Amino acid sequence: LLIAGHETTSHMISLGVTALLERPDQLAALQNDLTLLPEAVEELLRYLSIADYVPSRVALEDVVIGGTVIRAGEGVVPLLAAADWDPKVFDNPGTLDIHRGNRRHVAFGYGVHQCLGQNL
């Protein structure tokens, strides 16, 4: 866990600080109300999701996803972070909003394949 989490954690902190510095209104809101910190962290994880690729997969049968046919035997590299920008789940997903309150991001994966260290 130490090795796997060190790089992503340090990168996430750096990117989170940069994102807040680029958005003075969001930074000021957080500075004025530290109770927003848990929500800000969740929103930064969603907005900046850095562990975005999952291992490649091979289609076992023909399947259509979003109008694209993937034939049996073809490789697929899913972009997990795309789920964090789904407008059906998040209003204005391209906007960083520490007041969002929606924690349904997949920054740590999902299900049996989620990050073991996410609760640390």
Image: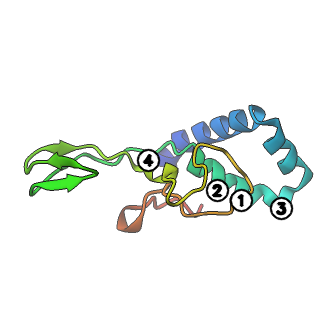
Which residue is rendered at x = 57% and y = 51% of the image?
46
Of helix, strand and loop, which one carries label 2? helix
Name the residue beneath numbered marker 2: 42
Name the residue beneath numbered marker 1: 39
Label 4 to label 2, Cα distance in Å? 16 Å
The disc labelled 4 sits on which kind of residue? Ala
Compare marks 3 and 2 and give the one earlier in the sequence: 3
The disc labelled 3 sits on which kind of residue? Thr
Residue 110 in the image: above or below residue 20: below
Q: Are marks 1 and 3 in contact (CB under 8 Å)?
A: no
Compare marks 4 and 1 and give the one earlier in the sequence: 1
Label 3 to label 2, Cα distance in Å? 13 Å
Of helix, strand and loop, which one carries label 3? helix
Q: Are marks 1 and 2 in contact (CB under 8 Å)?
A: yes
Q: Quarter of the image holding residue 74?
A: top left
Name the residue beneath numbered marker 3: 35
Q: Residues within 10 Å of mark 2 (few under 14, many from 20)?
A: some
Q: Nearer the viewer, residue 8 or 54?
A: 54
Residue 29 in the image: above or below residue 102: above
Name the residue beneath numbered marker 4: 82
The disc labelled 2 sits on which kind of residue? Glu
Compare marks 4 and 2 and give the one earlier in the sequence: 2
